[in-house]
Image: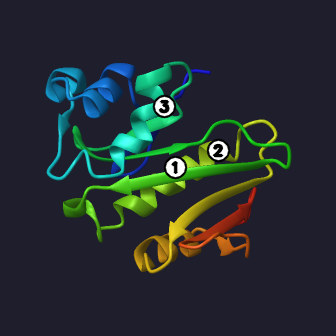
């Protein structure tokens, strides 16, 4: 599957390339790999390495996008592959600290959720959030996610049925 570019009013989700993943994970020249984009302040962030490691190490279907604002990479977002047997599909996301608290994460996650829910077999979108991460909990609640009671500490697991908004 080739991931599409997802475009919102302010942010664009651009599929991450293996070259970018290798640069983030392996320390190669990130700016060369990102061209024509540029890395924004604070990106890659602490979770970017984990998010991009599968693409760097295995290639194939990346499942990961770069969150881009006016040509500047401010975060990453993605899904953990096609839905499981129950139709659940987990997503993850993160923005660099200087880009938070401006509604950009909400826009990026809404784009991702919309795309995920159009994929065959998806019945529910899920996300795990660290207990105490109030910003992410609010963001997901605003998109119709609710605690499904199956999280394992230190995480809360939130879910939203397809079309659950």
Query: How many numbered tags mark residues here?
Result: 3
Which secondary structure, mark 2?
Answer: helix
Q: On screen, 133 above or below 58?
A: below
Q: Quadrant of the N terminus?
A: top right
Q: Residues within 10 Å of mark 1 (few under 14, many from 20)?
A: some
Taking the spot 64% from the left edge, 44% from the top edge, the residue there is 116
Report, in whole angstroms, how far the alpha carbon at label 2 lies from the one at label 1. Answer: 9 Å
Instruction: Where is residue 73? Give x, y as percent.
Output: 25, 42
> In the current view of this chain or complex, which residue is farthest to the front?
153
Front in this rendered view, residue 135 or 111: 135
Residue named by callout 2 = 116
Which secondary structure, mark 1?
Answer: helix
Q: On screen, 16 above or below 40?
A: above
**Residue 36's quadrant in the figure?**
top left
Q: In the rendered image, is residue 163 in sight? A: yes
Which is nearer the N-term, disc 3 or disc 2?
Answer: 3
- Of the two numbered discs 2 and 1 in the rendering, the one whose residue sits closer to the viewer: 2
Which is nearer the N-term, disc 2 or disc 1?
Answer: 1
Q: Looking at the rendered structure, which numbered label has been put on residue 111? A: 1
**Residue 148's quadrant in the figure?**
bottom right
- Does residue 10 appear to the left or right of 92 in the view shown? left
Q: Quadrant of the C terminus?
A: bottom right
> In the current view of this chain or complex, which residue is farthest to the right?
86
Instruction: Where is residue 118? Give x, y as percent.
Output: 70, 41
Report, in whole angstroms, how far the alpha carbon at label 3 lies from the one at label 1. Answer: 22 Å
- Of the two numbered discs 3 and 1 in the rendering, the one whose residue sits closer to the viewer: 3
Which is nearer the N-term, disc 3 or disc 1?
Answer: 3
**Residue 7's quadrant in the figure?**
top left
Taking the spot 43% from the left edge, 42% from the top edge, the residue there is 51
Taking the spot 41% from the left edge, 43% from the top edge, the residue there is 50
- Of the two numbered discs 3 and 2 in the rendering, the one whose residue sits closer to the viewer: 3
Q: Looking at the rendered structure, which numbered label has been put on residue 155? A: none
């Amino acid at each position: 599957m080739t991931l599409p570019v997802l475009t919102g009013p302010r942010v664009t989700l651009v599929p991450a390339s293996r070259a970018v993943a290798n640069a983030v994970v392996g320390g190669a020249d990130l700016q060369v790999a990102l061209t024509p984009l540029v890395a924004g302040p604070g990106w890659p962030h602490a979770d970017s390495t984990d998010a991009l490691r599968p693409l760097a190490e295995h290639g194939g279907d990346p499942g990961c996008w770069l969150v881009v604002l006016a040509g500047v990479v401010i975060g990453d977002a993605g899904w953990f592959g096609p839905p499981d047997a129950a139709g659940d599909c987990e997503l993850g996301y993160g923005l660099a600290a200087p880009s938070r608290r401006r509604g950009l994460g909400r826009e990026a996650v809404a784009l991702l959720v919309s795309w995920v829910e159009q994929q065959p077999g998806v019945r529910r979108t899920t996300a795990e959030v660290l207990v105490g991460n109030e910003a992410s909990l609010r963001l997901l609640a605003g998109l119709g996610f609710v605690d499904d009671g199956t999280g394992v500490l230190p995480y809360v697991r939130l879910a939203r049925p397809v079309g659950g908004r």
